[in-house]
Amino acid sequence: MNKLHIHPKYCKGCQICVEMCPKQALKPSDKMNAKGYLLPVEDDMSRCNACRECEILCPDFAIAIETDDE
């Protein structure tokens, strides 16, 4: 199963990754980083098809998907 990696110090909590995921594999959480921004978390990574839209669209390069092949 694919795995989500969030870099908390870079995330601004914009939730673009959550909104743009075509498979709804991510969700907003109540977990905050040091700056007080809400971080995204895995919802159901079995739905993730590793399209990397979340990585591509993140303006701060704060998210990465690790695939089974990596």
Image: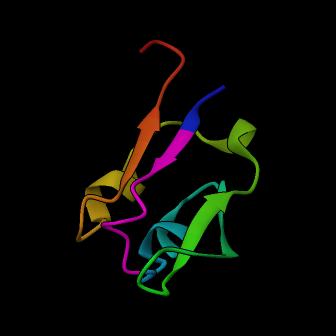
Residue 13 higher or lower than 44, as above or below: below
Residue 5 lies in the magenta-colored region = yes
Region in magenta: 4-12
Type of colouring: rainbow
The image quarter in which residue 18 lies: bottom right
| Residue 45 located left or right of residue 63 | right
Residue 8 place in picture, x, y as percent = 43, 63
- Which residue shows up at 33% across the image and 59% down it? 62
- Which residue reaches farthest front? 34
| Residue 18 located left or right of residue 25 | left
Residue 41 higher or lower than 65, as above or below: below
Instruction: Tell me the quarter of the image containing the C terminus.
Output: top left
Residue 26 lies in the magenta-colored region = no
- Which residue reaches farthest top? 69
In front here: 21 or 27? Answer: 27
Residue 58 place in picture, x, y as percent = 31, 66
Residue 11 place in picture, x, y as percent = 37, 70
Residue 10 place in picture, x, y as percent = 30, 67
Q: Main secondary structure of the magenta part?
A: loop
| Residue 28 located left or right of residue 36 | right
In front here: 63 or 9? Answer: 9
Asked whether the viewer can see residue 24, the reply is no
Instruction: Tell me the quarter of the image containing the N terminus.
Output: top right
- Which residue shows up at 41% across the image and 57% down it? 54
Total numbered badges shown on the rendered structure: 0
Asked whether the viewer can see residue 10, the reply is yes
- Which residue shows up at 48% across the image and 36% down it? 50
Residue 64 higher or lower than 70, as above or below: below
In front here: 16 or 13? Answer: 13
